[in-house]
Image: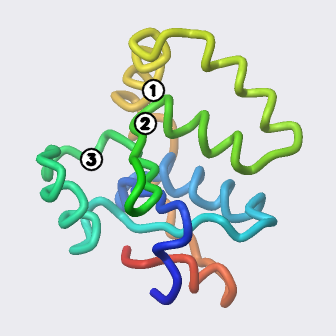
Amino acid sequence: MKDWKNKYIVFFDGDCGVCNFWVQWILERDKKDRFMFASLQSDFGQQFLSERGLETKDFNTMYLWKPEQYYLIKSRAVLKIADLLGGIYKLSAVGKLMPAFLSDKVYNMISRNRMKLANQKCYLPDQHQKKKFIQV
């Protein structure tokens, strides 16, 4: 857990195959070592949610947290992650032109159907990637 306060923390549903796919996708593209991860079900995730008065039993929302600064949810979190990854992913910034309530509608539709979209699979990070997980 060292130095996680200087990173961007991605909170995800640890029981979701789609979410685990995206965590793996971010890990493989995080060349600047900016991200760390914690499942929403973990003690760390539950503390994050409860300290902000957010729902602690519903795990259908991804959060991106920059400690001591801000947190983003749903489509805004996804767009910020893409922006931080840089390169071709910065092109996703065009998504910011769409109002959040519209892009969140798309996010919510995917979120509602995520368990049907991917099998539950156990992702096994390598040694370097394991250091990026605060709690699962």
Q: Is residue 126 above or below residue 59?
A: below
The CA span between labels 2 and 1 is: 6 Å
Three-letter code, disc 1: Ile
Residue 110 numbered tag = 1
Q: In terms of image quadrants, where is residue 43? A: bottom left
Seen from the viewer's position, the closer of residues 107 and 120 is 107
Q: Residue at x 34, y 28 (%)?
A: 112
Q: Is residue 23 above or below residue 116?
A: below
Three-letter code, disc 2: Arg
Q: Is disc 3 surrounded by few (<14), some (14 to 19) or many (20+) residues within 10 Å? A: some
Is disc 3 placed on a helix, strand or loop?
Answer: loop
Q: Is disc 2 surrounded by few (<14), some (14 to 19) or many (20+) residues within 10 Å? A: some
Q: Is residue 92 above or below residue 131?
A: above
Q: In terms of image quadrants, where is residue 49? A: bottom left
Q: Pointers 2 and 1 in contact (CB under 8 A)?
A: yes
Please report whichever mark, 3 or 2, sits nearer to the chain's N-terminal start.
Answer: 3
